Image (cartoon, grey):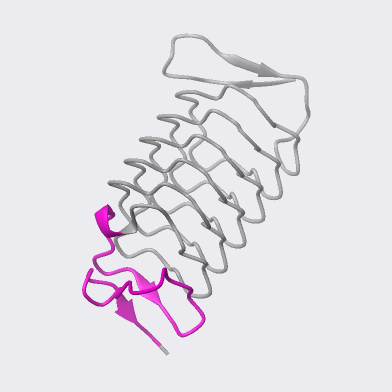
């Protein structure tokens, strides 16, 4: 049994021994305290992670399709190869996050903060990307952007 602390004044009990590769689809993790947690390879399809604390968490290879991550704090989180298709990242803090090869197709990133995030190889065909903060984010030739979107104009830095 895992008990996740929450800022919502109630602990979240999960009948598992580990969160790595866990099936947490549709789980209510609103305001969960998951900083530095190992969620590598977990399935979080349609999970509610609004206002969750995910600083430094390992979310690599996770499936976050249609997950709600509005106003989540994910600074320095590892989201390498994560599937964030159609997720809601409105106001999410992703400063210094590793999004190498992540797929954000159709994700809503209004007011999301990608400062200094690693976006090499990521699919950044997001909704409202022009309203996200990309200052100092790193990308390369393999990063995919929406048509007619210029990441340099938004402050991103091309490397390689």
Magenta residues (range): 130-159
The residue sitting at 40% across, 37% down in the picture is: 72
71 lies left or right of 19: left
| Residue found at the far bottom of this picture | 160
Check the image and report above or below for 72 versus 59: above
99 lies left or right of 46: left
> Relative to the observer, which residue lies in front, 14 or 105?
105
The residue sitting at 54% across, 28% down in the picture is: 48
> Relative to the observer, which residue lies in front, 83 or 149?
149
Q: Looking at the rendering, which quadrant does residue 42 occupy?
A: top right
Q: Where does residue 62 sit, x and y in percent of width and height?
A: 65, 49
The residue sitting at 50% across, 31% down in the picture is: 49
Q: Looking at the rendering, which quadrant does residue 158 occupy?
A: bottom left
| Residue found at the far top of this picture | 10
Q: Where does residue 108 sit, x and y in percent of width and height?
A: 42, 46
| Residue found at the far front of this picture | 147
> Relative to the observer, which residue lies in front, 97 or 142?
142
């Amino acid at each position: 049994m895992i008990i996740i602390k929450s800022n919502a004044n109630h602990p979240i009990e999960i009948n598992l021994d580990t969160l790595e590769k866990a099936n947490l689809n549709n789980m209510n993790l609103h305001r969960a305290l998951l900083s530095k947690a190992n969620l590598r390879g977990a399935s979080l399809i349609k999970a509610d992670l609004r206002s969750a604390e995910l600083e430094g968490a390992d979310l690599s290879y996770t499936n976050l399709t249609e997950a709600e991550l509005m106003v989540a704090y994910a600074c320095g989180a590892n989201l390498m190869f994560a599937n964030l298709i159609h997720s809601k990242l409105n106001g999410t803090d992703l400063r210094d996050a590793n999004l190498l090869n992540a797929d954000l197709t159709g994700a809503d990133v209004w007011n999301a903060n990608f400062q200094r995030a690693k976006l090499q190889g990521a699919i950044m065909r997001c909704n409202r990307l022009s309203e996200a903060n990309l200052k100092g984010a790193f990308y390369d030739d393999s990063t995919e952007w929406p048509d007619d979107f210029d990441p340099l104009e938004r402050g991103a830095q091309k490397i390689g």
